[in-house]
Amino acid sequence: MKLDKPYEEIYKGFNKNRKRDLKKAEAEKYNLDKEICADEFLDFYLNEPKNHQLRQDQITTIKALLKATNKAVHIWGIRIDEKLMASLVWLKDANRITYLLPIATTQAKEKGLPTLLISNLIKEYQNSGLMLDFEGSMIEGVAEFYKSFGVEEEIYFSFQKYFFCLKK
């Protein structure tokens, strides 16, 4: 999603479910926290039930990312009554914002907080010309969620070249 126009114009591309969830979420008394610490995020991420099992190498990679002292790594979250309900690790470079690692409680999902988090990210970088990259998903429901923000699917091609020697 190219963030090259005002939020109001981008919002017009949201589908009715995103608009409904956003209205529901904005009715909550929430706090957008743009400085979630790595340890709090990791604890929240590891302890919140997910529909997949994390392997140890994945956990090690997440820990390394969160501990990086790189200004490109950002962790935002939404709190209700000071309790972290939804959070997101995202990366920013000169051209792109990469939506990397989201997590939300079941209650947060019911309240539309993941939509609110993404909406705030879009508002923050509206008119910037940056690309918001959701990185797609092979999980149909997740891919549909991303598309509901009005994004267009991008096809990436991959080329691999294998070098090998034949022994005679």
Image (cartoon, rainbow, N blue to C red):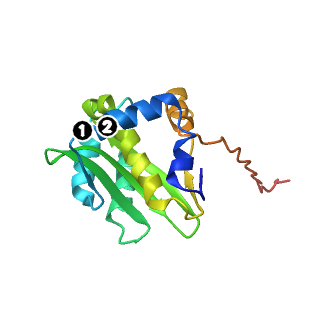
Above-or-below relation of 167 to 152: below
**In whole angstroms, how far apart are the C-alphas of marks 2 and 1?**
5 Å
Q: Amino acid at mark 1?
A: Glu
Q: Position of residue 17 (x, y in %)?
A: 46, 28
- Mark count: 2
The image shows residue 102 at horizontal and vertical percentages of 38, 45
Relative image position of residue 105 (x, y in whole percent): 27, 35
How packed mark 1 is, by other alpha carbons closer than 10 Å (few <14, some 14-19, many 20 or more), is few
Q: Are marks 2 and 1 in contact (CB under 8 Å)?
A: yes
Where, by quadrant of the figure, is residue 137 drawn? top right
Q: Secondary structure at mark 2?
A: helix
Instruction: Please state which of residues 56 and 121 is positioned toward the viewer in this rendering.
Output: 121
Residue 134 visible to the viewer? no
Q: What residue is rendered at 74% in x and 48% in y?
A: 157
Residue at x 47%, y 53% (from the top left corner): 122
105 lies above or below 41: above
Question: Mark 2 — residue?
Answer: 25
Q: Is residue 102 above or below residue 68?
A: above
In the displayed structure, would residue 36 be above or below residue 50?
below
The answer to whether residue 15 of the structure is visible from this angle is yes
| Residue ID for mark 1 | 28
What residue type is disc 2 on? Ala
Local SS, label 1: loop
